[in-house]
Image: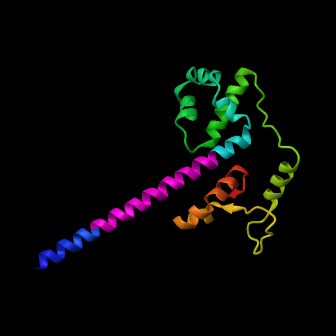
Amino acid sequence: MYETVETVAHLQSEQHVEALRSKLSVIEEREAAIARREAESALYAKHPDFEDIRGDDKFHSWAQEQPEAIQGWIYENPDNVSLAVKAIDLYKMETGLSTKAKQPTGKSQSARSAADMVSTKTTSVDTKEPKIWSQREIAKLSMVQFDKYESEIDQAILEGRIVP
């Protein structure tokens, strides 16, 4: 009888551990996706023409001629934006393309400047302004809350409204 209770308890523990592993896996995948989006957003901020460059065969041909370290900056670098930016800077410099990031114009420039000046420690929020999210705040969201706000968070990443 004691062995049966012990076996049942052991099986329940294994099931509980497996359920936790499954949940952790989902959370890790979401964290990786958020990190990728944030990195891509930062890359677009430095190089608004990044999408054109990424799809350009000339860029990939140039990359294949580079030392392995620089190829790693481009193809094996999911989380270090500064290395990817440097690789694109180098590509632009060597090919004669402009290395200056295009400055946003009109309303988006003033909105971005205003977002940079907003304190994240305010207690009241003007509902007319888009929310500025912190990385810590996003990390604390439950899976249900994250699902609810995922599209809003994605938009915030694209607009640079995520603060460390």
* Residue shown at 18% from the left, 71% from the top: 7
94 relative to 30, above or below: above
Q: Quadrant of the N terminus?
A: bottom left
Q: Residue 22 in the image: x percent, y percent?
A: 39, 59
Extreme-right residue of the structure: 106
How many discs mark residues in the rendered view? Answer: 0
Of residue 129 and residue 94, the one placed in the foreground of this image is 129
Q: How is the image coloured?
A: rainbow
- Confirm whether the magenta stretch covers residue 31: yes
Q: Is residue 164 visible?
A: no
Q: Residue 42 in the image: x percent, y percent?
A: 68, 45
* Residue shown at 62% from the left, 62% from the top: 149
* Residue shown at 64% from the left, 44% from the top: 40
160 relative to 149 in the view: left or right: right
133 relative to 105, above or below: below
Extreme-left residue of the structure: 1
Dominant secondary structure of the residues highlighted in magenta in the image:
helix
- Confirm whether the magenta stretch covers residue 43: no
152 relative to 125, above or below: above
Q: Is residue 49 visible?
A: yes
Q: Quadrant of the C terminus?
A: bottom right
* Residue shown at 33% from the left, 65% from the top: 17
Extreme-bottom residue of the structure: 1
20 relative to 141 in the view: left or right: left
What's the magenta region?
14-39
Q: Residue 51 in the image: x percent, y percent?
A: 67, 34
Residue 25 falls in image quadrant: bottom left
126 relative to 155 in the view: left or right: right
Residue 14 falls in image quadrant: bottom left
59 relative to 75, above or below: above
Q: Residue 145 in the image: x percent, y percent?
A: 57, 67
